[in-house]
Image (cartoon, rainbow, N blue to C red):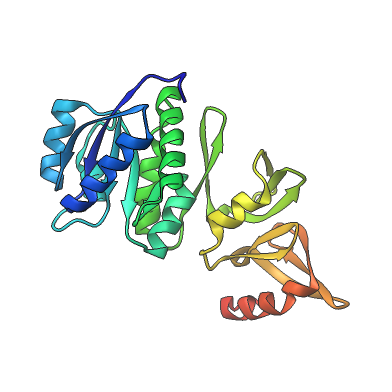
Amino acid sequence: MNQFKILNALIVDDSEQARELLRLMISELATTLRIVGEASNVDEAKIAIESLKPDLIFLDINMPGKSGMDLLVEMEEKNFEVIFTTAYNQYAVQAFKLSAIDYLLKPIQEDELMMAIEKAIIQKNLKTDSQRMNVLMNNLKEKSGATLAIPLNAGHEYIRLNNIEFIEAERAYSVIHLTDGSQKLVSKPMGFFEEALESTQQFLKVHRSYIANLSNVESFQKKNEAGLLVFKSAKKADVSRSYKKELIEALQREKTL
């Protein structure tokens, strides 16, 4: 981290105690950050952003009146990185994972804080794309039709979940099979996609090498004690015995059988 310049940071949270605690943690742990201001609501935050021009904002989502997301909607230019802070909310957390956006669950843990800061500094110095924020706002609004952000060396690629048929493990890589018959080789292991998609109802791990989009399944075929999924593109994926029962129950809920 020492190779990067010191970044100016702004803390936005309606709780004075939460702001103070985060400020103390940052001052003790993050020598690459300098806290230049604080704000307790969206209106204060907008004024602070205009005057202080922070490189990084620690932004609480749930605030009285306008939320942290409202702040981003109202800001025409977003020349800063954001690390969201939030109390536990499974749906919001899922949206962050899909969008490749860093977040911190309260109470904030030191190791998670440092990891989020390191990522934010790298993103800021690489000047990566800002489309992730738009993707996040879409994913927070839509339970269906969400978008998956896949980190690349210099940015992200965005794929609509509905366009994915299944994801296949390929050693340390993964292959994303799309509904148009094409595929994308991604330098991320299967575990990355398991975590990003774990709370979506339409995706289910069906084999140690496959995660399937149930909404794009054409049929399920029994194969001894295991099975085989056939997708709308006619591609196929094996189903292991240990996942078969859960898969059949999920497909029945989807009414695809």
**What residue sits 60% from the left and 52% below the top?**
193
Residue closest to the far front: 28
Residue 38: x and y in percent read 17, 39
Residue 42: x and y in percent read 15, 46
**What residue sits 60% from the left and 49% below the top?**
192
In the image, taking residue 161 as reference, residue 22 lies left or right, namely: left
Q: Is residue 143 visible?
A: yes
Residue 67: x and y in percent read 21, 53
In the displayed structure, 121 sits above or below 249; it is above
In the displayed structure, 6 sits above or below 247; it is above
Q: Is residue 58 visible?
A: no
User: Which quadrant is the C terminus positioned in?
Assistant: bottom right
**What residue sits 24% from the left and 57% below the top?**
62
In which image quadrant can residue 105 be found? bottom left
In the displayed structure, 24 sits above or below 129; it is below
In the image, taking residue 250 as reference, residue 144 lies left or right, namely: left
